[in-house]
Amino acid sequence: MALTADYGLGDLTYPRGWFMVGTSADATTTPSALRYFGQDMVLYRGHSGRPFLMEAYCPHMGTHLAANKTSYVITDGKHVEGDNIRCPYHAWRFGPDGRCNEIPYSPAPIPKRACIKSWPITERAGCLWVWYDEEGGEPDYELPAFADYDQPHWVNWSVECLGELDCHPQEVVDNMTDKGHLEPVHGSIGMIRFENEFDGIKVRQILLAGHKTLAGTEAMLNDTWYTGPGILQSIMVGENPSLMLIAHTPVHDGRIKVWYGLMVKVANAAPSPDDVSVAKQYEKAGVFAFAQDFEIWGNKRACINPMMVKGDGPFDKLRIWYRQFYNPRARAAEFQARVNGHYVSRGTEEAPWEDAA
C-alpha cells in the first residue's frame, strides 16, 4: 500500500476538497461510527432533521460516542436529544458545535476544553458531503449543484457504496487521462475522440467512441469531469441521457471508500415504472463498467512513476493538477498555471498528447 509521501504529492497527507461521507439514509437518530481522513468520527441525525458529523471520542475519558448498545443512555433513548449527542459512559452531552453543554452529575462549570471537533455537513442529491482541509480553511470552491436531481424527466440515482479499497486516490484520478485502458478494460471501439481539459480545480475528459456491447459500432459521447479531488460526474449522451456519480473519500492514507450512482433522463416528466426499470438497467450496466476499474485498482501495485509511452495520455499533466489539493491553498494557482489548457490524444499517430497545444 503506497502513501501520499510515496507519490511526492505535497505537504498534506489528505487532499483539500469536498468529499462524500455517506448517503442521506446513513444518517439516523442512531449514531454510527465512521472513519475518514485517518480520524474516527460519529454520524447522526438530530431531531431537527439535520445530519451531524463529530469527532468520535469523548474528551472526558476517551469513550467512543457511537460504539455502544448496552448503556442505559442508549436503552433509555437519551443517546440523541434534540440535536445533541450524549456519551454512553458518563452521559456528558455535546451540542452540534461540539461543545459540552451538560454534565448531569457535576455542579461545577463545564471545562472550556470539554469539546470535540465537528465537521459541517451539506446534504445534497441524496448524499452527505463534508469539506475537508488540513489547514482548517473555508471552502475555496463550490460543491456541485447536481441540478438534475429531483427534476422532471429524471430518475434519481440510488447511490451504492462499493466498499473500501487499499488504493491511493492518485491511482483512481489517473483514469481521467488514461486513453489506453478504454478498449482492453471497458470495451471501447472505433475511438474518434479523446481529449482532456484542465481548468483550475476541474479536469475534464471527452470520449467519443463505440462500445462492444452497449452501442455496437455507433459512437457515444461521454463527457466526464472531476470537481476537486473526490467527486466525478459523467454525462453519456444517447437515447436516454444519463449522469453518473463516482465519489471516493480517503479512509486513511492509502485506503479509500467508494460510491456509485446513476441518474437517467426519460421521456415522461413523471417517470413511469417502465422508465424506472430502464434506469435500473442503465445503472446495473454502469456498476459493471466501474467494477472493471475497481478490480484493476484492487490488484495492482502502486504506480509511483508511470512508464509513459507515446499515446498514453497526459498523465504527467494530471498528476501536476492533482498536487494542488495536497499543498497549501496559497500554492494552488501555481499548479493550475502549469497545466491549464486543452490536450488532444486521440490515436497514437494523428495527435500525440505531447505535441498538442
Image (cartoon, rainbow, N blue to C red):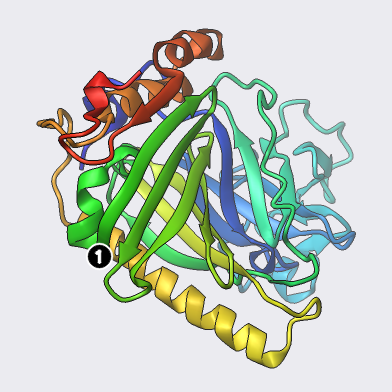
Residue drawn at (43%, 44%) of the image: 206
The image quarter in which residue 139 lies: top right
Asked whether the viewer can see residue 295, the reply is: no
Count of marks, rendered view: 1
Residue 249: x %, y % from top left: 47, 46
Q: Could you say which is closer to the camera, residue 77 or residue 149?
A: 149
Residue 112: x %, y % from top left: 78, 25
Q: Could you say which is closer to the camera, residue 296 or residue 198?
A: 198
Residue drawn at (46%, 10%) of the image: 337
The image quarter in which residue 55 lies: top right
Amino acid identity at mark 1: Gly
Residue occupied by mark 1: 187
Q: Is residue 148 above or below residue 332?
A: below
Does residue 302 appear to the left or right of 265 in the view shown?
A: left
Residue drawn at (76%, 49%) of the image: 92
Does residue 108 appear to the left or right of 141 in the view shown?
A: right
Q: Name the secondary structure under disc 1.
A: loop
Residue 80: x %, y % from top left: 79, 61
Q: Is residue 197 above or below residue 39?
A: above
Label 1: how many Cα within 10 Å (few below 14, some 14–19, many 20+): some
Q: Residue furthest bottom?
A: 273
Q: Is residue 65 above or below residue 61?
A: below
Asked whether the viewer can see residue 301, the reply is: yes
Residue 237: x %, y % from top left: 53, 60
Does residue 10 appear to the left or right of 203 in the view shown?
A: left
Name the quadrant of the N terminus.
top left
Residue drawn at (40%, 11%) of the image: 338
Q: Is residue 74 above or below residue 117?
A: below
Name the quadrant of the C terminus.
top left
